[in-house]
Amino acid sequence: MEKPWLKYYDPHVPQNIEYPQILLQQILDDAADQFPGENAVFFFGGKIKYRELRDQANQFARALKGMGFRQGDRLGILLANMPQTIISAFGALKAGGVAVFFDPLAEEEELLRQIKEAEVENIVAFDLVLRRVDHLFAQTKLKQFIITGVKDYLPFPRNFLFDLAAKGRGIHVKLARKPNVHPFPEFLLRGRSLSSIAGQEPVSPEEIAFIQYTRGTSGPPKGVLLTHKNLVANLLQASAWVGKLEKGKEVFLSISPIHRTYGMTMGMNLSIYAAAMSIHLPQIEILQALSSFKKHRPSFFPAEPAMIERLSTTPDIARHNVSSIKICWSMGNPLPEEALQNFGKMVGRRVCVAYGLAEASPLTHAQPILGRRKVGSIGIPLPDTDARIVDVPKGAKEMPVGEEGELIVKGPQVMKGYWNKPEETSRTLRQGWLHTGDMARMDEDGFFYITGKIARK
């Protein structure tokens, strides 16, 4: 099929990318080798440098293996955006395993279903979530619990004051001293004293790195199998699209949840690949975001549509230095054009509207950063990404330009399949094409527009 969108690529964007055959954890090792003394994570006043982030991921990996964690095992991660999420995810990869992300705000019944379905035996959990979900664990195969909280990475005296405030509000969590319950700081200390993790069997880039659950907009959430190859490909596609990231110099504002693929790729993986400092906030809170703009002048903001809409109507926003943003993305629900225009005027940059889904790691389309844009469009396919509009329900016939049908995509970022759901996998992946379940149309220039959802039976 002709690809009319290629002529609208920005000059810095290649049509094709050469993808290195590496494991995802290599991006952390590279950043630590090249920029060991640069700040990697900023969390409520606490800073972690790249050498420290790698060291702690290695310690976590050694402690996992010392606990009996084997190659291919799955580690559950039930955390908000915090340093421990990054350390746990990359620690699991360095131990030869798979990180399975769960939403800490998910309904109890759904969370129980996911934990049981993923068959995880080890989990890293946020202490403030424990009271709500601890009773679920007895109904699963979970055996080992690594528990952490906000104060674990707060500098003194903030950690002390946080502890006092938590006790005053009745939300202080006192962990039971059991052999299978491991406070996060003690777990890292254990890993520091253990021998090197070298000598393990090599893992292929085709192997699963992360399992991310869909949002469940069409049926119950499904576990998406994302390989090292998928994840490396998508962060390189995003980096090529941006074209302006200066390694070791950027600052990311990472609010989008890491347990979603958008936050994971754009707020965690891409930040590490760029050796940037990433400011992690556990939730979308307007005052915290504005404070981060003013103090740290972030240059890259992978935003949620709701955040852009709220910021676009915030009075006196200019005094918070939002003009430091060089690149702002928005992926998710469509934004009113007025909100996009208002926010763009505030920061002096256009918002890069993008499209994707968990099954594609997640990005497949985006509006050009510099060039032509069209109102209401999700943009054009990223490098090495093909897209078509096909008939519903068979998906066998390509629709003419301008006519509606199902959007299907193909590229190196497309998932391996769904966890333990062969029928769902075969229905969604057909001859290498990912059937998105979204109705769309393509215009004569190759710009795509989402028009609705397909009602699956």
Image (cartoon, rainbow, N blue to C red):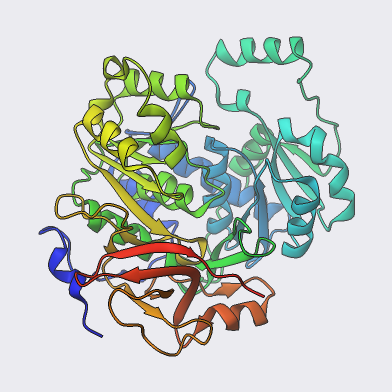
Q: Where does residue 307 sit, x and y in percent of width and height?
A: 44, 34
Which residue is at 40% across, 68% downward? Answer: 440
Which residue is at 86% across, 38% downward? Answer: 178
Q: Where does residue 387 sit, x and y in percent of width and height?
A: 34, 75
Res 213 visible: yes
Nearer-the-camera pick, 251 or 39: 251
Q: Is residue 172 left or right of residue 454?
A: right
Nearer-the-camera pick, 62 or 166: 166
Q: Is residue 391 above or below residue 136?
A: below
Which quadrant, please, contains the C terminus?
A: bottom right
Q: Is residue 375 left or right of residue 23?
A: left
Which residue is at 89% across, 54% downward? Answer: 139
Q: Where does residue 64 sit, x and y in percent of width and height?
A: 66, 52
The image quadrant that residue 327 belongs to is: top left
The image quadrant that residue 318 belongs to is: top left
Q: Is residue 275 left or right of residue 242?
A: right
Nearer-the-camera pick, 225 or 359: 359
Q: Where does residue 158 sit, x and y in percent of width and height?
A: 56, 13
Which residue is at 55% across, 53% downward? Answer: 196
